[in-house]
Image (cartoon, grey):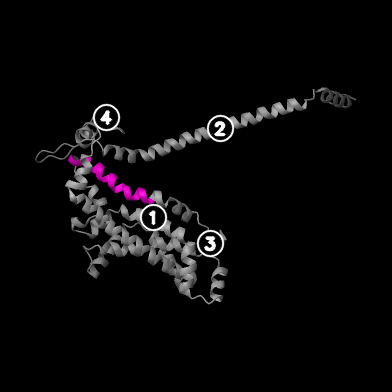
Amino acid sequence: MDMENEILEENIEVENEPKLSPEEIRRIALKDRKKRGVKKKLKIVILTIIALLFATSFLMPTVLTIANSFMSANEISTNYGVIFNQFKEPEWGERKSTEYISETVNLKFIPDMVTFSQYATVLLKSPEYLLKFWNSVILVVPIVFFQVLIALGAAYSFTRFRGKRKEVLFFMYIVFMLMPYQVTLVPNYLVADWLGILDTRWSIILPGAFAPFSVYLLTKFMRRIPDSLIEAAKLDGASEWQIFKKIAVPLCKGPIASVAILVFFDYWNMVEQPIIMLSDQEMHPLSVFLSKINTGEIGLAFAVATIYMIPAILIFLYGEDYLVEGISYQGGVKG
């Protein structure tokens, strides 16, 4: 009887609960929707602020370099002299020691007085800076062209003609690609010396042209091309050269562009290879020369660094879509 009474009481309580009208239900649902919308907007705002902080931290050195390239030498010395005067010149027989510095560096993004004197010196009065710039162009452009050209042929060969030997060879490509280039500097030096091309630009261009990075990426892209497409071309009487020229290369335009951009960035900033392979400093690229500008010419260093960034920035802005397309490429008609 007690159980029956409890059940009856619960049913009476449920029946006595006030029922909500459709307007009240609609009002409650609208409140919940607004709360969810506020939470979503707050989440977007927080993520945007975090992204802006990261973007600012990444872009700050670039913006600071460009802004400081328009400062006068006195202003640069006033703002950053603390950094470049922190080492005392040692006396005879004394070790070089670091001086304690209590001052702070004054980071400025807007010059007090805009001047183009650094750029006038770099572009007009001192031709050695432009000479180093063109040394970089002469080294990097052939490397990018020949590496992409050789990689296309090698990637097509690895894609179309498979076998145990070629799989082993492709695995070796992967192994060499994973090795840091500092490991291969000594073998490259010995081979260049044996070929008699040491202290010439070919000692840098040839190892760069045969680098395995582009071969690996383009092989992975070409292997996504459907076999049915190639078989249909063969049934129509197409030769291997026609398949390569009219099917493989056009379907890999995005990956080719992305590979070329990545290779350009890699070799545009090279330092170790020219130092090891080229004893003549007149042949060194600007990337090596930037680290050798003394502290008395720090204003020129900012201007030269800005000029040095221009090709990389332009190539990235022009080829950003190709780079993204190549990275997200899913393989011809399969994608």
- Residue 335 sits in which quadrant? bottom right
Distance from disc 3 to disc 2, alpha carbons, whole Å, reads 39 Å
Do the CB atoms of the residues marked 3 and 4 lie less than 8 Å apart?
Answer: no
Query: Does residue 300 belong to the magenta stretch?
Result: yes
Could you tell whether 62 is left or right of 330 in the image?
left
Distance from disc 2 to disc 1, alpha carbons, whole Å, reads 37 Å
Q: Please tell me which of labels 4 and 1 falls first in the chain.
A: 4
Q: Is residue 234 above or below residue 211?
A: below
Residue 194, given in percent of the width and then of the height, sits at: 24, 69
Do the CB atoms of the residues marked 2 and 1 lie less than 8 Å apart?
Answer: no
Instruction: Give the labeled residue for mark 4.
Output: 104
Instruction: Give the labeled residue for mark 2.
Output: 41
Q: Please tell me which of labels 3 and 2 falls first in the chain.
A: 2
Give the residue displayed 31% in from the left and 47% down from the top.
309
Q: Is residue 17 above or below residue 118?
A: above
The answer, for residue 132, to whether it is visible in the render is yes
Instruction: Give the labeled residue for mark 3.
Output: 332
Distance from disc 4 to disc 1, alpha carbons, whole Å, reads 39 Å
Give the residue displayed 45% in from the left and 60% down from the top.
253
Could you tell whether 168 is left or right of 194 in the image?
right
Q: Is residue 302 above or below residue 37?
A: below
Q: Which mark is residue 303?
A: none
Give amino acid for label 3: Gly
- Range drawn in magenta: 296-315
Give amino acid for label 4: Thr
Residue 287, given in percent of the width and then of the height, sits at: 27, 51
Q: Which numbered mark, 4 or 1, is in the foreground of this view?
A: 1
Q: Which mark is residue 261?
A: 1
